Image: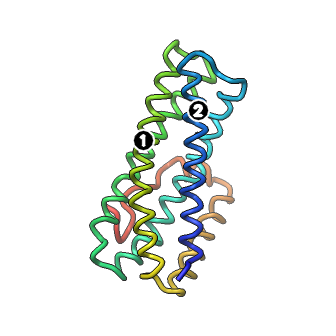
Amino acid sequence: MELASLAQLERSHRRHDEVMAGLLEAARRLAAGRPDQGDVARVHEAVAYFQRAVTRHFLDEEGSVFPRLSTRRPDLAAELAALSAEHPTQIAMQGEIAAAAQELASEPRPNVGKVLLDAANRLAAAHRAHVLREDELFRIAHEALTGQDDIEIITEMETRRDRDDEPGAERRRRGGGGGGGGGGGG
């Protein structure tokens, strides 16, 4: 069965792929000392995307999808826990990119482009490996989860997005997320 919640998370994976591709292109030019006019802005847009969307995506997986999937398919619990355990590392890598981006905006060191490129390459490799495994689990989840699960997951995801629109949401987003969610996190 095609589940809307999983389709939304899969679209998020593809959007992340696009953002990473743009970030890598910009970082390569910056590292080579031949940036395009919009490269610094592209890096800052990627950082904003990571802060806004990726943490929420991880919360959707860890707080809604993974617990239900581990209940329906206990044999997947270890893999779900392993995926959840990777989220904080990816957030830390995104933080390295944000730090390099901040330096680009102020007075950059001569090697900040290389630092950015190295961080972007590490994140891209981690993301590719992670998403390959998640996409495979999502194929299984389309069969394992029920229509009622999908309704509940979508409702929870919408609640997270509504909460992100409230005053103070930016502070909450920066303060955490992505680690050790229920049912598959650790």
Q: Secondary structure at mark 1?
A: helix
Q: Earlier in the sequence, mark 2 or mark 1?
A: 2
Above or below, 16 relative to 184: above
Above or below, 97 relative to 115: below
- Which residue lies at the image location 58% right of the left edge and 22% below the top edge? 30
User: Mark 1 — residue?
Assistant: 92
- Give left or right: position of 138 versus 21: left
- Which residue lies at the image location 50% right of the left edge and 83% below the top edge? 149
Q: Quarter holding the C terminus?
A: bottom left
In the rendered image, the residue lying farthest to the right is 37
Image quadrant assignment for residue 41: top right
Residue 166 coordinates in the image, percent (x, y): 68, 59
Amino acid under label 1? Ala
Residue 35 coordinates in the image, percent (x, y): 64, 21
Image quadrant assignment for residue 71: bottom left
CB contact under 8 Å: marks 2 and 1:
no
Mark whose residue sits in front, 2 or 1: 2
Q: Tag 2: Cα neighbours inside 10 Å, few (<14), some, or many (≥20)? A: some
- Which residue lies at the image location 51% right of the left edge and 30% below the top edge? 99
Q: Secondary structure at mark 2?
A: helix
Q: Nearer the viewer, residue 127 or 102?
A: 127
- Give left or right: position of 150 versus 162: left
Amino acid under label 2? Glu
User: Mark 2 — residue?
Assistant: 25
